[in-house]
Every structure is written in structure tokens, then in C-alpha cells.
Image (cartoon, grey):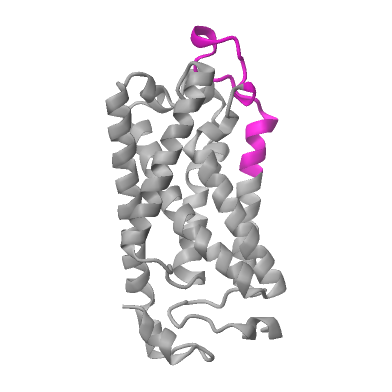
Amino acid sequence: MTTPALLADPINPLQRFNSPSRSWSLLLHTLGLTSFLSTFASCYLYPTVHPNYTSHSDIQFLNDSFGGHFQFLTIIGLVAAAVGFTAALLADISGSFQLFKIKNYISIISTPLACLVSLLYWTIIAVNKEMMLPPEIIEKMTPTRDFGLHLSPLIFLTIDFLLFSPPWAINTKTAFYIHFSLGQGYFRWIQYCQKQNGWWAYPFLENMTMMQRKVFIVASTFISWLIFVGFRALYDSINRNNLKSPIEGASPKETKKRK
């Protein structure tokens, strides 16, 4: 049953399924948030020996290093996904469109980021596992944990965006500036962590020159932006037929807005 609060703001006519709601939307966000939080907790419940323990420093566990797990783009993306799904779950329960909008804005970053993480991780792993993970971490990377870190966010965020969300409310130019800024911010962050710890977060960065690292970050940022463009095109392709029967309550302006 639709609550009165849900009628306070019209649902975008391109949105395929009702959200926020206490039905499928609530189920999706509950399952997704449970996956994100349990995976994040496992990083601290099962301490990991950091990549260069014996050769670079006497800090044995990654949790004790500067930046900890937040040196990794995977964890940053996982936390972003968890924050977005927390807002979405609260929106489903309360019917708040303000919380729903917060989730949608976070999705602009978290969804392409989840795709980038999966793309880079599985590509590099296919070439050489030890370029991405040292042997100590590979031994402790169970299939469940691997799935939770490197596939689950992409699956849940993709379903949420394509089926339970309106189209992203920014253009490609603005998205490029956002992704580029965040990419540069992340590179400065891991540079600082490297200076504090004496080692780079990812083994493959150890074997690169500084120029190669910068090129890798810029290329990854560009790929992230292309993923944004691709997701938006996929959204239009899947949901544009909804314009033929717009959801009751949507304004004519919203119906014609998206091209």
C-alpha cells in the first residue's frame, strides 16, 4: 500500500518500479545493505597482513597502517554504496523523498565506481593475481568475501539504478568534472598514505614510475566517466517506453524532460 508520504513528490515517469516503497524496493535495499555491511565488517573481524609487511615496515596488520582499508578504492566504493542504500532503506520505511534523492545523488558516484572496481579487479586478476593482491591476502580471500567486495556492490547498485531510480540529474560534462576531481583526490590520498606507510596500497603500483601511476589514475578516471555515460544510455534504452504510460502524479514537465 502506498503511504501518504509517498504522494508528497511525483515519481519520475522513466522510473520502472515504485520506490521508495515497502515492497520490492525495501527488499532490494535490505539485502544490499546487509551484504555491504557484512563485507565491510569482515575486513576488521579478520585482520589482514598488509602487502609489504616484511620488506617495508614493522606494521604487521593492514588495520594498523595509516589509512587502513580506506587506502583501497574497493572499500571507499563499498562505503559509498552502504551510505546510499542506508538512505534508500530509510526512505522506503518512512516514505521520505528527501532521503530518496540523497540516495540518487550518491548513486551518481557509487554506481560507476562499483563498475570500475569490478572491471579493474577482475581484469588484473585474470592477468596476474599478485599484481592486485599479495599472497597473504589471496590465501584469506574466500569466494564469499571476494563476491562481497568485487561483485555484490555492482549487482545491487545496477539493479537499483536501472529499475528503482529516476535518471541521473546531471549532464555528462558535470559528471566528467566530478569523476576527474574525485580521481585526483584519491590519487593524492594514496600518495600521502604511501609516504606514511612506505608502500603503495596495490602491488602493481609498486612497479610503476610516478608518471605511469598518474597515467593509470587519469585513464581509470576517464573509464569511470565512460561508465557513467554508458549506464545513462542503458537506462534510457530500458526505461524510455515508460513514457508511453507515465506514472500518475508525474508532471508534464518531467515527462518531457529526459532526452
212 over 117 or under it: above or below = above
Which region shows up in magenta?
38-64
Estimate the x, y position of residue 142 in percent, counting from the top left: 56, 33
Please tell me in which quadrant of the rendered image residue 206 appears: top left
Q: Is residue 239 left or right of residue 22?
A: left
- Residue drawn at 37 percent across, 58 percent down: 175
- Is residue 44 rendered magenta in the image? yes
- Residue drawn at 63 percent across, 84 percent down: 8
Please tell me in which quadrant of the rendered image residue 99 appears: bottom right
Q: Is residue 234 left or right of residue 56?
A: left
- Residue drawn at 47 percent across, 70 percent down: 163
Estimate the x, y position of residue 79 in percent, counting from the top left: 58, 46
Q: Nearer the viewer, residue 3 or 123?
A: 3
Estimate the x, y position of residue 7 in percent, counting from the top left: 63, 86
- Residue drawn at 53 percent across, 42 percent down: 76
Q: Nearer the viewer, residue 171 or 157?
A: 171
User: Does any portion of residue 3 appear in the rendered image?
Assistant: no
- Is residue 103 rendered magenta in the image? no
191 over 56 or under it: above or below = below
125 over 60 or under it: above or below = below
